[in-house]
């Protein structure tokens, strides 16, 4: 039995070493150990963690980073990865606790003071909130603003940094779709609280200059579309449509 366990550990260790430079091997390693990643995250969080939780993204990114950092001198790979998952989740909770204060919503959002020449997603949402019952939309805006505060800005900062030209909108949509379809990119974004410009550019084909200029807009759209914000997401349907063109 002990020999069997050692052989399994050695096989995983070898796969982890190969996965450092082989994307297919990395994806195979992650796929084979998704249950372990979720279980480790659940134990660390003291509650059941699913793939729809932020904690899953944090744990997944920690596991992927363990692949990059692993060497035989660290012992077996899986205990090493579990340690990194626990540490990252602890850091995540320490970080997010600093942003638990209430986030105020800009007054013009519900009073009609937004200028037409800055009509982007944020202003369109403001207009919609005046035409319909704003209660649920206000809740979504407050919740998403708390999330965006961890990236250093608020939802209504977007009036001045949303893409206007059709070509730029399509490029941003392609970058957003690339992130949403890549668990590793989404996990990296949520873990680092920054846009992984180089990786997104390589995978989406969108130039780094565009990604840098519209960083806030891309982060907002990813946060909304990956979260539980149906009201806000309804204003971003064009992203999926344009990304598929």
Image (tube, rainbow, N blue to C red):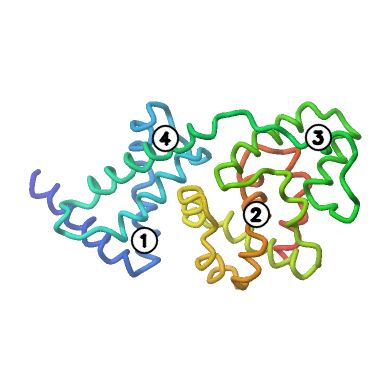
N-terminal-most mark, 2 or 3: 3
Q: In this image, 117 relative to 177: left or right?
A: right
Tell me what residue is drawn at x 55 percent, y 43 percent.
150
Residue located beneath label 3 in the image: 107
Q: CA distance from mark 2 to mark 1?
A: 30 Å
Residue located beneath label 1 in the image: 26
N-terminal-most mark, 1 or 4: 1
Discs 2/3, front: 3
Residue located beneath label 4 in the image: 94
Instruction: Classify mark 3: helix, strand or loop.
Output: helix
Residue located beneath label 2 in the image: 216
Instruction: State the image coordinates of residue 115 (x, y, percent, origin top left).
Output: 89, 49
Discs 2/1, front: 2
Discs 4/3, front: 3
Tell me what residue is drawn at x 35 percent, y 50 percent.
63
Instruction: Classify mark 4: helix, strand or loop.
Output: helix
Q: In this image, 94 relative to 128: left or right?
A: left
**Are discs 4 and 2 less than 8 Å apart at CB?**
no
Tell me what residue is drawn at x 50 percent, y 48 percent.
190
């Amino acid at each position: 039995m002990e020999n069997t366990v050692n052989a399994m550990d050695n096989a995983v260790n070898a796969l982890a070493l190969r996965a450092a430079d082989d994307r297919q091997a990395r994806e195979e390693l992650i796929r084979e150990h998704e249950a372990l990643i979720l279980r480790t995250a659940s134990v660390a969080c003291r509650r059941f963690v699913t793939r729809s939780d932020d904690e899953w993204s944090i744990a997944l990114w920690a596991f992927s980073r363990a692949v990059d950092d692993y060497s035989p001198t660290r012992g077996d790979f899986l205990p090493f990865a579990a340690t990194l998952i626990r540490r990252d989740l602890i850091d995540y909770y320490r970080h997010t606790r600093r942003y638990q204060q209430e986030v105020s919503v800009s007054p013009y959002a519900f009073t009609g003071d937004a200028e037409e020449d800055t009509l982007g997603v944020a202003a369109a949402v403001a207009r919609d909130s005046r035409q319909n019952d704003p209660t649920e939309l206000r809740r979504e805006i407050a919740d998403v603003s708390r999330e965006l505060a961890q990236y250093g800005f608020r939802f209504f900062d977007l009036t001045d940094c949303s893409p206007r030209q059709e070509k730029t909108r399509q490029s941003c949509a392609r970058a957003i779709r690339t992130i949403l379809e890549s668990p590793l990119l989404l996990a990296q974004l949520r873990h680092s609280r920054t846009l992984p410009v180089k990786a997104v550019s390589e995978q989406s084909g969108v130039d780094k200059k565009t990604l840098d200029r519209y960083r806030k807009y891309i982060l907002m759209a990813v946060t909304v579309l990956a979260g539980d914000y149906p009201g806000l997401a309804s204003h971003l349907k064009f992203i999926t449509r344009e990304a598929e063109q």
